[in-house]
Amino acid sequence: MKIGIMGCGSIANTLINFQLNGKLNVKLAYFYDLNKDNAIKLSKKVNGNVVNTIDELIEKSDLILESAAQGAVRNSMPQILESGTDVIIMSVGALLDSEFKNKLESIAEKNNARIYLPTGAITGIDTVNAATMDKVESVSLITRKPPLSLGVELDDSEEKILFEGKASEAVNKFPKNINVSSTLSLASGIDADVKIIADASVKNNTHEIHLKGSFGELVTITSNVSSPDNPKTSMLAAFSAASLLNKLSKTIQIGS
């Protein structure tokens, strides 16, 4: 399977490293970025190819992985799905616009394409999916990040609540920081309650999930190491994308 990459930043770079270490069973073959130098830099590491347009990326790829931004999803995803090409979307926040999400689903169904959403930088999504088989009562997320990754300066041990509200609001105010709230909301079918805290006492990006439903209760805490290339991105987000790429070609599937 030849994979096209749209957005050659920290997530794409981590995927490249997995391929170089023999941990990916697919080939990262084609690279596209608005900053062509980024695409050239990554493609050279794996003897890949730089493409100049989305049309060319579609033509040559079996599957396209988006790791750019919500704007890229909005601008390019309809065209990609209309071609019948499967996609992996990392900028999940774009799908909290229900009208846009429904549009993509409709295009994908008409053109026999699939949309894959990695679990990203949180844990417990399989349980969240299972819980929706019956009643889900409430879903909430508390995210703590080092102030620098949120563009805030604080004294040692100081913390500041930057946001408290629904995930659909959070993804608009923090589009590069809180895709996890989108994944949680889409998995649960509920616009999750979200609190974002800049915390000078933490080194890792931490996400705490509380889910209540007819099945019982789920509480998870995930403390993620930030990507060395981008403190706004957790390494686990890239790991989940790599795991999904491998899963697509495996005979035995574990989890949903």
Image (cartoon, rainbow, N blue to C red):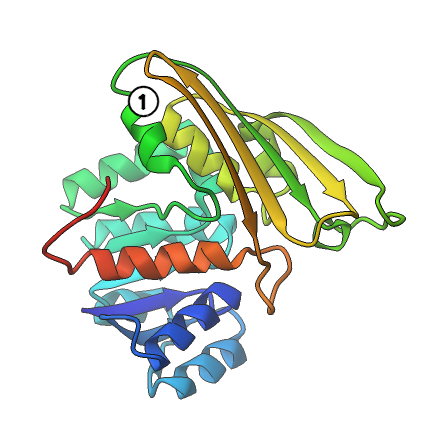
Instruction: Please say whether residue 99 is visible from this viewpoint.
Output: no
Residue visible at 42% across and 50% down?
Answer: 73
Across and down, in percent, residue 23 comes to: 30, 72
Give the residue at mark 1. Answer: 131
**Would you say 207 lies left or right of 7 here?**
right
Q: Quadrant of the C terminus?
A: top left
Q: Residue furthest right?
A: 155
Q: Is residue 127 above or below residue 214?
A: below
Residue visible at 56% across and 34% down?
Answer: 208
Q: Residue furthest left?
A: 251
**Residue 194 figure quarter:** top right
Foreground residue among 12 and 73: 12
Count of numbered badges drawn on the protein = 1
Instruction: Please say whether residue 38 is visible from this viewpoint.
Output: yes
**Would you say 151 lies left or right of 155 here?**
left
Residue visible at 23% across and 49% down?
Answer: 82
**Residue 172 figure quarter:** top right
Across and down, in percent, residue 72 comes to: 46, 54
Q: Is residue 123 above or below residue 62?
A: above
Q: Quadrant of the N terminus?
A: bottom left
Q: Secondary structure at mark 1?
A: helix
**Would you say 106 lies left or right of 213 here?**
left
Residue visible at 31% across and 22% down?
Answer: 131
Across and down, in percent, residue 66 comes to: 39, 58
**Residue 42 figure quarter:** bottom left
Task: Specify the amino acid type for callout 1.
Answer: Ala
Across and down, in percent, residue 247 comes to: 22, 56
Foreground residue among 164 and 67: 164
Foreground residue among 79 and 183: 183
Classify mark 1: residues with Cα within 10 Å, few (<14), some (14-19) or many (20+): many
